[in-house]
Image: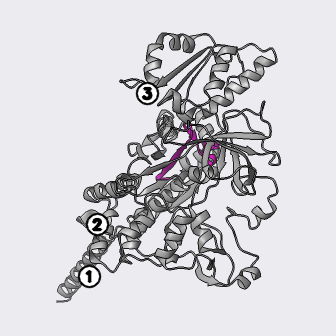
Amino acid sequence: MFVFVDTLFVLTVLSLFIWSINHIFRRVKRHNLSIKSGNIHFYFGSESGTAKQFAGDAANHISSSIRVNVKVVDLLDFSRNTFHELLQESDSIVVFILATYGDGEPTDNARTFFQLLKSYDGCLRGLKYVVFGLGDSAYLHYNAVAKFVDNQLAVLGACRLQELTLGDAADNLEARFSAWQSNLVSILAEHFGLRTPCADGTRPTPVSTVEYVGFFEHITAESAVNVGGVFTGEPQILNSYRFNAPPFSAKNPFLSPVIRNEELYAADCERSCRLIELDISHSGFKYAAGDHLAVVPCNSSCLVDQLCTLLNVDPEQLIRFSNSVGSPVRTAFPTPCSYRTAFTHYLDITSPPRFALLRQLASTTSSETERDLLQLLASGTEEGNTKYEKWFLAERRHLVALLEDLPRCRPVAKDLLNLLPRLQPRYYSIASSPRLFRDRVHLIVAVVKYRTPVGRLRFGVASDWLSRLPEMSSHLIPVFLRRSEMRLPRNPLIPIIMIGPGTGLAPFRGFLQERSFIKSKGGRLGEAMLFFGCRHRSQDFLFSNELTQALATGVITDLQCAFSRDQPSKVYVQHKMLELSAKIWRLMSSEG
């Protein structure tokens, strides 16, 4: 009897134990593990802030999808020891989100990492990585940095977990990123043996509400004085435009007077291109031929007025973000400032809207039809991407146009302040040499002006603003210097080939001035070919007299011009290069 009771008791306890273990296992499996597995490190190389934004978005998306430790780090903080630290971690993955700047160059915060990777002589076997690139296919060196990093990591023995993905600013970059992000979650989940929330076939609903970084408030002028004053367009340092003291940088631009602003195209040309000469005598800038000058632009006052009207806000109303005790907080732009200042100097209101903004707009419209459209545009589906490309890439709608076309969509202004990207500097190749113009820089600015397929007139943010600035006036342009890796050879006898159609001639004009100076001092020069292209010899042949003079004096030895529309069949620079391919090959393969 006792034996039977004891046996029954043991069987009951054993059954309860097995049931408990099975229940726990099923809960762990269903909730995708209660303990985080693995480490994901996001490193970003960002010039305009997009790569940084994407890194943060991807990190948040992964954190909400699978149970892993996620960290976002600026590539500025990457050192040689970082590779060793990453290799020592058990089961870590490194994700690089990298923008390419200018002539295939890394962004400022990625330069040290880029050089480190080029010279790294160790072995990275065991390191697992993913690379996403941001570039513009309109440029020759499309996504060059991402391509190099992806290839070099593989060469050094690292393991590529996902094929290199290249985002194109000339295409639907947001959709490309969204698809890559979703695929990355699946790859990481499989790698760590986890389940994603979408494993059952459902798709997570994107968050459409705005997350504020602090308290938002309207303030009076008196209140603004009490907290130190009002920003009027300064990128980061209050009153830096008022005192404008060195050292000058992206955070503290130099305010440069306009010495010259003249039209370069012929009077009968429908297009416009300006030669803008700036005075940098008090800046301390020491530029070299080939460097870039960054111009900090502002949005059109008419467009800003339209936006404020659509949002039903007073443009001069002062706004401020602060924490619970009234202290400033880190935001996308500095406050206190007015709505006008925010939309004029700090926020990008002309680029195609991002998905997060569209989702927020969908939550604010009172029209079901408008809501369905906005949700489709931000869906990332094939149908949504096709619609997005038509509305924003083909028909060139920006935020103001979108709100005009959707009359029931009227968001709260403060929501946009958190969702609109920061207005970015525009980089121009300097078209002069300090040998001839030590205290001046020349810029060649093609003025962007066109009509969209739906009939709206569009202007380039920076080019339109610059073209209208009067000479020798009180108008000052915020600028800072950015070094370039494009340089003339140290030895002037080394042959050079320059290809500069249209405004691409800018850096080579500086090179020609440099070579002219060397020649004037008795220096010897090697062969130099220049290929230039434009539409018509009589309308847009930039600096024709200077180029002819350079050829006559031996500053260049061969000038090849392609005027694409001066004859029935179009002729471009590449046709001229093909005709002279033997000579090009001879120069490229010559000693030195």
Who is closer to the viewer here, 156 or 78?
78
Please report whichever mark, 1 or 2, sits nearer to the chain's N-terminal start: 1
Q: Which residue is mark 2?
A: 203
| Disc 1/disc 2 C-alpha distance (Å) | 42 Å
| Disc 3/disc 2 C-alpha distance (Å) | 51 Å
Q: Which mark is residue 564?
A: 3
Q: What residue is shown at x 66% (from left), y 34% (from top)?
A: 290
* SS of the residue under disc 3: loop
* SS of the residue under disc 2: loop
Q: What residue is shown at x 52% (from left), y 22% (from top)?
A: 561
| Disc 3/disc 1 C-alpha distance (Å) | 89 Å
**Highlighted range, magenta:** 90-113
* SS of the residue under disc 1: helix
Q: What residue is shown at x 39% (from left), y 26% (from top)?
A: 570
Image side of residue 333 versus residue 38, left or right:
right
Q: Position of residue 185 (x, y in %)?
A: 37, 57
What type is the residue that disc 2 sits on? Arg
